[in-house]
Amino acid sequence: MARRRLRLRKPRGTGERIAATVVALAAVTLLFHMALAAQSAVVRRWPFFLVVAAGGLTYGLWRLLRSSRAQRARADMLARLRITLADIDAMDDKEFEFALRDLLIRDGRSDRRVGGGGDQAADVIGDHPQRGRIVVQAKHTRVGGKVGSSVMYAGDGRAVHRADHAVVVTNGAFTRDAMAWGDRHGVHWADREKLQRWAESGAALHELLKVSARSRPNRFTRAA
């Protein structure tokens, strides 16, 4: 047997209206007394609530200050960042990608590392309000190793990542054909000599690659 839904109906007759009014007044009175009781409790215990509020505010300010100090410390560290070629040669592939990311941040870019399987020619992507988006393909190799043309083909991530500039960076060297192909197709390259100037001397990558400033704001980042 299905249950019947209960429905409220409007009071009928004078008696029911008076009863409904009395109930409503009682409810309002109860709520009023509850509010007075709550106010009285707050007044009696205001030192406790004040201490709790002050403690919460102090903790929040401490966390904010700690985060701000950590960000300033990292910014200062990156501003002074210098990495020797010997340190770079001793890195593995992932450490090399992280090092390039930090160097790009030092150059004033908002960067993120995206290297990994299926990265589509992007180990690091960097945005700059005036110089646009750069996509970096990192090729860590043994000392004396050379990067061929096939890497340059794969390193052109401009279409996939909507980049303004594509660059392949290696701690080794490029073959003559690789450099020629990159120059013809607008894929920048940074070999061991350029990497040393970038990492050790503090020169910015866009200066080494002769990437000019944009005449219009970068569509991927906000102006600083």
Image: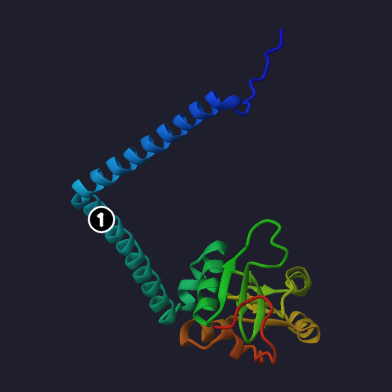
Q: Quadrant of the N terminus?
A: top right
- Pick the front one: 219 or 72: 219
Q: Secondary structure at mark 1?
A: helix
Residue 46: x, y in percent? 21, 51
Q: Is residue 60 above or below residue 194?
A: above
- Pick the front one: 1 or 193: 1
Q: Is residue 95 above or below residue 189?
A: above
Left or right: residue 146 compared with residue 33: right
Name the residue rendered at 49%, 77% in the picture. Answer: 85
Name the residue rendered at 66%, 77% in the picture. Answer: 134
Name the residue rendered at 77%, 85% in the picture. Answer: 180
Q: Is residue 71 above or below residue 212?
A: above
Residue 56: x, y in percent? 30, 55
Residue under circle 1? 55
The image quadrant of residue 32 is top left
The image quadrant of residue 36 is top left
The image quadrant of residue 65 is bottom left
On the question of residue 76 being in view, the answer is yes
Q: Quadrant of the C terminus?
A: bottom right
Left or right: residue 56 compared with residue 94: left
Q: Mark 1 is on which residue type?
A: Gly
